């Protein structure tokens, strides 16, 4: 999931320049090329031609998109909150209170 890792990295970058674009897209391209080369070698039993046959299926792309969206949604919310807090200067005003319920009786082990 090189795509997912690089998208997580891209979400952390605030000021983009050509180096970031080159590194992120270059990493995705290099990984994809390596996977295609390794997938084309019949010596790797069980993996030969799997990529080429699965990328032709619609379900592969739907699952890939769904996995990426599901993995990025929680991160989008946290990053957005942190950036707004930093922008408006309320970074330390954000407090989360967690109510702790005391345990009345400790568990007895037998």
Image (cartoon, rainbow, N blue to C red):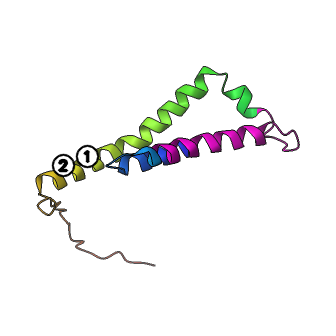
Q: Is 62 one of the magenta-colored residues?
A: no
The disc label shown at residue 84, or none:
2
- The Cα–Cα distance between marks 2 and 1, rounded to whole angstroms, is 6 Å
Could you say which is closer to the camera, residue 81 or residue 37? 37
Tag 1, which secondary structure?
Answer: helix
Cβ atoms under marks 2 and 1 closer than 8 Å: yes
Name above or below for residue 98 compared with residue 59: below
Tag 2, which secondary structure?
Answer: helix
In the picture, the quarter occupied by the N terminus is top right
At 14% from the left edge and 64% from the top edge, which residue is drawn? 92
Q: Which residue is mark 1?
A: 80
Picture quadrant where residue 73 is located: top left
Residue 25, given in percent of the width and then of the height, sits at 53, 41
Residue 16, given in percent of the width and then of the height, sits at 37, 46
At 53% from the left edge and 26% from the top edge, which residue is drawn? 62
Picture quadrant where residue 46 is located: top right
């Amino acid at each position: 999931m090189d795509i997912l890792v690089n998208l997580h990295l891209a979400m952390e970058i605030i000021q983009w320049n050509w180096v970031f674009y080159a590194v992120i897209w270059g990493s995705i391209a290099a990984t994809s090329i390596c996977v295609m080369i390794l997938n084309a070698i019949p010596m790797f039993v069980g993996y030969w031609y799997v990529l080429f046959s699965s990328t032709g299926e619609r379900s592969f792309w739907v699952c890939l998109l769904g996995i990426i969206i599901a993995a990025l949604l929680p991160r989008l919310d946290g990053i957005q909150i942190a950036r707004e807090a930093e922008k408006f200067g309320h970074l330390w005003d954000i407090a989360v209170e967690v109510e702790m319920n005391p345990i009345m009786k400790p568990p007895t082990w037998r």
